[in-house]
Image (cartoon, rainbow, N blue to C red):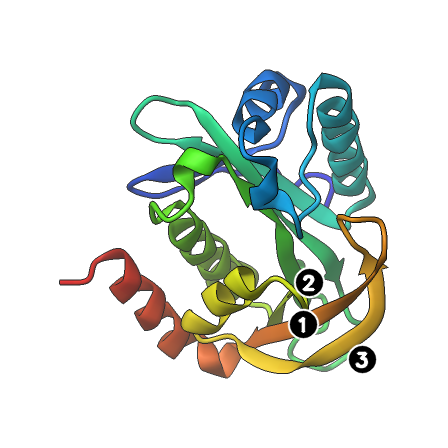
């Protein structure tokens, strides 16, 4: 998985493999209204962003994540970041049709944040469409999972409107952005649900 290095391009944004050259752009993108990031871990300042990028790249090297910089197509400005992570390959028995499957079997999408000016612009919706399409149609995963802080109603509403199914609350699941044990709301899409979810995402991007 450390060799996974690809760009996903849409009409409004593209997702470029995260690289140290994106650091300055990420610093600029995360500056502004810190209140927007109350429930999300978003690096603030140069040193925190360097650490954030280096950690993401170490996960990519280990084969457990594929991190991206979110870049606006119109002017090439970095407007945020997102990634695949908790990437798993299952031990399918010999003779099973998925034995030797080269791509992940399941993954999670997360660590997603946008610059204040890019929230409610369709950038997040298009990013999810690009990432889910790649996961289900290229990797042919069986499930994509998304978690968000139980308290983050804006994020939960956004996940629900694209057709993700609520699975429950994981208690004290992760370290929260406010350095408390976070209860996570868990959502997922499985392969059989992807065609309907794709229609929802496409409709959200083009209301016509």
| Residue picked out by circle 1 | 185
Callout 3 environment at 10 Å: few (<14), some (14 to 19), or many (20+)? few
Tell me the number on the disc at residue 149. Answer: 2
Q: Quadrant of residue 148?
A: bottom right
Left or right placement of residue 100 versus residue 121 in this view: right
Q: CA distance from mark 1 to mark 3?
A: 32 Å
Q: Quadrant of residue 36?
A: top right
Please tell me whether residue 158 is drawn above or below residue 124 in the rendered image. Answer: below
Q: CA distance from mark 3 to mark 2?
A: 36 Å
Q: Are marks 1 and 3 in contact (CB under 8 Å)?
A: no
- Residue 136 lies, in percent from the top left, at 51, 66
Q: Earlier in the sequence, mark 1 or mark 3?
A: 3
**Residue 32 visible in this rendered orientation of the protein:** yes
**Residue 142 visible in this rendered orientation of the protein:** no
Please tell me whether residue 8 is drawn above or below residue 200 in the rendered image. Answer: above
**Camera-side mark, 3 or 2:** 2
- Residue 10 lies, in percent from the top left, at 34, 43
Q: Secondary structure at mark 3?
A: loop
Residue shown at 83% from the left, 66% from the top: 173
Q: Secondary structure at mark 2?
A: strand
**Camera-side mark, 1 or 3:** 1
Q: Are marks 1 and 2 in contact (CB under 8 Å)?
A: yes
Residue shown at 65% from the left, 48% from the top: 38
Please tell me whether residue 115 is drawn above or below residue 103 in the rendered image. Answer: above
| Residue picked out by circle 3 | 93
Left or right placement of residue 179 versus residue 43 in this view: right
- Residue 152 lies, in percent from the top left, at 61, 62
Residue shown at 37% from the left, 78% from the top: 196
């Amino acid at each position: 998985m450390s060799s996974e290095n690809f760009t996903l391009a849409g009409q409004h944004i593209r997702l470029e493999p995260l690289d140290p050259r994106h650091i300055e752009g990420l610093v600029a993108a995360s500056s502004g209204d810190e209140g927007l990031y109350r429930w999300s871990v978003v690096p603030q300042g140069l040193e925190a962003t360097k650490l954030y990028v280096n950690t993401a790249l170490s996960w990519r090297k280990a084969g457990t994540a594929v991190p991206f910089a979110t870049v606006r197509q119109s002017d090439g400005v970095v407007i945020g970041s997102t990634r695949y992570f908790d990437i798993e390959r299952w031990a399918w028995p010999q003779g099973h049709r998925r034995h030797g499957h080269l791509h992940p079997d399941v993954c999670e999408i997360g660590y997603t944040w946008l610059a204040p000016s890019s929230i409610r612009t369709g950038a997040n919706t298009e990013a999810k469409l690009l990432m889910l399409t790649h996961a289900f149609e290229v990797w042919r995963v069986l499930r994509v999972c998304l978690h968000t802080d139980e308290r983050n109603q804006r994020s939960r509403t956004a996940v629900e409107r694209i057709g993700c199914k609520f699975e429950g609350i994981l208690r004290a699941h992760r370290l929260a952005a406010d350095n408390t044990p976070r209860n996570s709301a868990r959502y997922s899409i499985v392969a059989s649900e992807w065609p309907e979810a794709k229609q929802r995402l496409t409709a959200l991007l083009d209301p016509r």
